[in-house]
Amino acid sequence: MTTGEWPGHRAGEPGFRRAATAVFLAGIAVFVSLYAPQALLPEFSRSFEVTPAASTLVISVSTAALAVGLLVLGPLSDRRGRTGILHASLAAAALLAVLIALAPGWEALLVLRGLQGFALAGLPAVAVAYLREELHPAMSSRAIGLYVSGTAIGGLSGRLLTGVLTELGGWRTALGGAAVVAVACAVAVRLLLPPARRFTPLSRQGRLLRQLGSAFTDPALLALYGLAALLMGGFVAVYNAGTFRLESEPYSLTPAVAGLVFLAYLLGSASSPTAGWLADRMGRRVVVPGAVALMAAGIALTLPTPLWCVVLGLCVLTVGFFAAHGVASGWVAARAQLGGRPVGQAASLYSFWYYVGSSVGGTLAGRAWQDAGWPGVALLAGGCALAALMLTGALGRTRSLQP
């Protein structure tokens, strides 16, 4: 395929609506599959007689495998194209979602979750690069924000669905419901996603490896990779341990009621495209530090005991996280494109560190909850937010590549 003179899909055109809707639904599918078990961590701890720290492995093993998958599928997409990898990824992940609901034991569950995590890497490996290439440049930030909002809604719906279904039929029923959502979204994306028209493959492996190395030579990209790890590490730490906190004294909430706290994700789905709109007008170097500071404030608000304060803190944290992540992920693609670096590889590296942060932060959160309770979790997440804020200061001093 060649780029030609076609400028990309514009807002209002059928191609734009189909592309934006398909990637939005793909985001839902991936995050329903990836984080549906998060609301079930106390249930896994009881059913399989494992510690709270061990139960977080059902999330961490999947995000770690996803991070590894990004190192394979991101560069592969620069050679083979975006859409084929995306469709194969969603189909394999949906099949594995069905098998996970039927897993015979804890070890089998972890193995299947690892395989699913690798399969799920297809979306974050290609989504931002696809949108950057196939949409008009004036539309890409808006569409990327919509994609991130899809991931937020996927994370929300997966957690709410499993929270309700686990009371009706246990964790198998809950994960079976998540599998139905994954299958439906995979079919819809297959029907909706327009074929790539502006993709230009990197044909030589040597050139591919050289350009992969170039993704590590830009200080701004390096800072954005670090930002991804720190933001996600803090965010997942709060939500992983939060399920245990809400089902413990003094709250003693049922899984279904505790799952309602994930409604905060609706605010995240709105804050991401809003932050993208603000970034187009005020600049990314202004919006990202403000969003990270908001995330830090949310973590602090979760420290007092009253439930309303905890919920408010989670809402503020979620708004700040998705705003920062939505703008930062688009920043990576724009920076790579303007700097002559492969967009797919740069986006994959951002996502790689994003999920490394999820694996490390989620696992450490279980240990922090066991050893120090909620103050230990807040200290872990707050440290991540503070380090991320320092990185945004360094990021603001890097040279701009905007024409």
Image (tube, grey):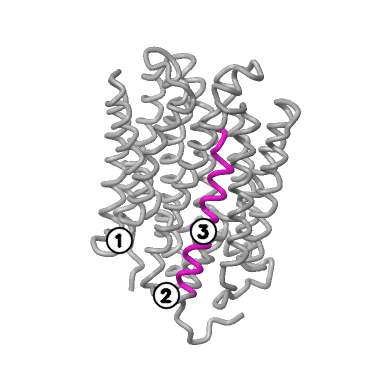
In the image, which disc is placed on residue 87?
none
**Of callouts 2 and 3, the N-terminal one:** 2
Pick out the residue farthest to the left: 282
Magenta stretch holds residue 24: yes
* Residue at 29% from the left image edge and 59% from the top image edge: 279
- Disc 3 marks a residue whose amino acid type is Ala
Q: Which residues are magenta?
A: 15-37
- x%, y% of residue 172? 65, 31
Furthest residue toward front: 168
Residue in the picture at 39% in, 53% down? 326
Residue 156 visible in the current orientation: yes
Task: Give the secondary structure at mark 2.
Answer: loop
| Residue 211 in the image: above or below residue 167 | below
Residue 247 occupies quadrant: top left
Judge left or right: residue 28 versus residue 381. Answer: right
Mark with earlier residue (1, 2) = 2
The answer to whether 46 appears left or right of 110 in the picture is left
Tell whether label 1 touches label 3 (CB within 8 Å): no
> From the image, which quarter does the N terminus lie in?
bottom right
Marks 3 and 1 sit apart, C-alpha to C-alpha, by: 22 Å
Q: Position of residue 4 (x, y in %)?
A: 52, 86
Res 346 label = 3
Residue 277, numbered label:
1
Query: Going from the N terminus, do you reach mark 3 or mark 1 first?
Result: 1
- Dominant SS in magenta: helix
